[in-house]
Image: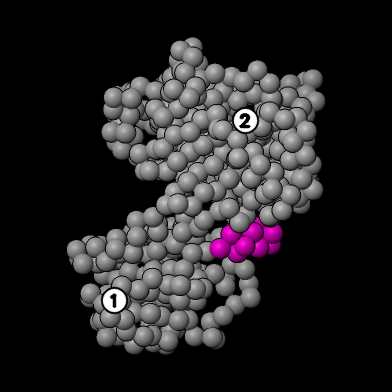
Amino acid sequence: MPELKPFRAFRPKQEFAQKVAAKPYDVLNSDEAREEVKGNPLSFLHIGKPEVDLDPSIDLHDERVYAKAKENLHKLIDDKVLVQDDEEHLYLYSQTMDGRTQFGLVGCVHKDDYWNDNIKKHEKTRKDKEEDRCQHVRITNAHTGPIFLTMPDNQELNDIIKKIAANAPDNDLTDNMNVRHTSWVISDAAICKRIQEICKDTKYFYIADGHHRSAAGAIVGREREKANPNHTGKEEYNYYLAVLFPASHLYIMDYNRLVMDLNSNTEEQFMAKLNEVFDVEPQTTQFKPTKKGEVGVYISGKWYKCNFKPKYASNDPVEGLDVSLLQNNVLNPILGIDDPRTNKRIDFVGGIRGIGELERRVNSGDMKVAFALFPTSIHELINIADAGKIMPPKSTWFEPKLADGMFVHFMD
């Protein structure tokens, strides 16, 4: 049974929170991060993307990059921008975007729950990205960005969340993407204990986003364990930072595909082959899928509503995903996209950018054809994780992203 542990968070004072909160390290490249931090020395990107304060010629994995992250983190603490709570707490954290709010519980999860598969994964990690995050954790001695977890809904837990959220928050800010981030300290020990009991009654937690951060937390925790002859399992290094959302709170957006050419097919040949896979209906206006099994195809200024023919249905949790059906029956056999992870002829556009971005890319001549997909559901993600399987690349786009800098957990 997984554990969610209270901890003594370092958090920004309310008067600094607006400037501290930042996008996660992996949603911006270095140049974008340098632009983002201009005129804002308090941005947490100075910790998440510390290369912004170094010469651009320095390799991103140079020891000086991680050392700069540590220096910048301690400067925020020394300057009393980030202040540690006197006691251990769980926290409530909400995000509001486009009128919709999702609530998550902030605490720490145990590394052994990762290794014992009480924290379920659905994505393969890359060793180079794992090592990058491990080095960041080792050198800063901190978890500076939370793992994005989910769990099956529990009505009592949802009721507790509502009661906490009815109180005045401790931090409240709106970022430059117009997302509101709000947090509350859960100071009532009895409520904290009950939340922990509910979590322990949950069979599994599921990684929604942050597989590399989660792996790093577990790997470095295990390293500390091996280095400590008096290890008990309760030391702070055994835990890493997470935000746990009930499944119904989460919103997964569509993750769409663009292909550069038709793989030597004429447009007529391509459409004929599509008609073998789909029931195809021409549209007079922009088309966005409204249910599983529907795909929007945009080519030569025209939209088509495409429904997979019944013979392509699959009960397998991975093979039955729309992204898998598209890959296995269109992208690979018709368009020659054998491996979407490495093929340079395919690109991916998250739903946050809208269907109009697909039209723009095709109309510009940059891409030849676009595929708009219905979002993968959180229940599909959970079913795949329960089956011990891996989701295809670019299957889920969670929005909004968790802000870095709202909570920091130190390993001792």
The local secondary structure at tag 2 comes to: strand
* Crowd rating for badge 2 (residues with CA inside 10 Å; few <14, some 14–19, many 20+): some
Where's residue 399, x and y in %? 46, 51
Residue 233, horizontal then vertical, whole percent = 77, 29
Picture quadrant of residue 303: bottom left
Magenta span has 337?
Answer: no
In the picture provided, is 208 more to the left or to the right than 55? right
Left-right relation of 367 to 155: left
Seen as rendered, the residue at the extreme left is 364
What is the magenta range?
Answer: 377-387
Is 379 included in the stretch rendered in magenta? yes
Residue 359 is labelled as none
At a point 61% along the width and 56% down the height, the residue shown is 248
Counting residues from the start of the chain, the first of labels 1 and 2 encountered is 2
- Left/right placement of residue 362 relative to residue 338 reads left
Q: Nearer the viewer, residue 360 or 155?
A: 155
Q: CA distance from mark 1 to mark 2?
A: 48 Å
Three-letter amino acid code at the position of disc 1: Thr
Which of the 4 image quarters holds residue 227?
A: top right
- The answer to whether residue 264 is seen in the rendering is no
- Residue 185 has which mark? 2
Task: Give the answer, above or below, for where 228 lies relative to 389.
Answer: above
Dot 1 corresponds to which residue?
285
Query: Residue drawn at (35%, 73%), measured in percent from left and top?
Result: 287
- Residue 256's place in the image compared with 166, above or below, is below
